[in-house]
Amino acid sequence: MPAVASGAMGAKLVCFYPKNAMSEHHTHQTSIALFDPEFGLPLAFMDGRLITEMRTAATSVAITKAAA
C-alpha cells in the first residue's frame, strides 16, 4: 500500500501466514517503510501492527466523540 505526499513517501507491507493461527504468532505480519520523497533514501522501518492498532483506537475515539 504505497502513499506519497509532499513531505513523505511510504509503503505498508502486509504478509498473510495462515499457519500462524495455530501458534502464538499473528496471521498478518505488517511493516511500514518511510522514504525521503526527493531522493528515495530509507528513513524508517516500523512495526505496522502497532501503528495500525493505535490508529484504529484513535479513530474509534474520534468517531465516538463526534457522534456523542
Image (cartoon, rainbow, N blue to C red):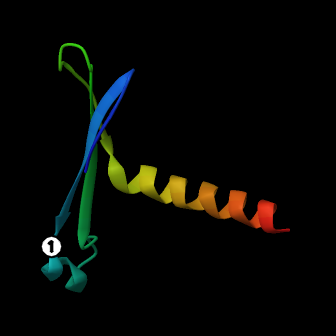
Up the image or down, 17 lies above or below 42; here it is below
As displayed, is residue 51 above or below residue 8? below
Q: Say which residue label 1 marks.
A: 17
- Left or right: 68 in relation to 46: right
Residue 54, how many percent across, how many down? Answer: 53, 53
Residue beneath the point at 15% across and 73% down: 17
Front residue of 55/3: it is 3
Q: Position of residue 48 (x, y in %)?
A: 34, 50
Q: Quadrant of residue 60?
A: bottom right
Is 21 located above or below residue 3 in the figure? below
- Where is residue 2 drawn, in percent x and y? 25, 44
- Measuring 17% from the left and 20% from the top, which residue is drawn there? 40
Report the residue at 70% width, 57% height from top: 62
- On the image, the x and y values in percent for residue 58 come to 62, 55
Task: Count residues near mark 1 (Cα–Cα under 10 Å), then give few for <14, some for 14-19, many for 20+.
Answer: few
User: Where, by quadrant of the figure, is residue 65 drawn?
Assistant: bottom right
Mark 1 secondary-structure assignment = loop
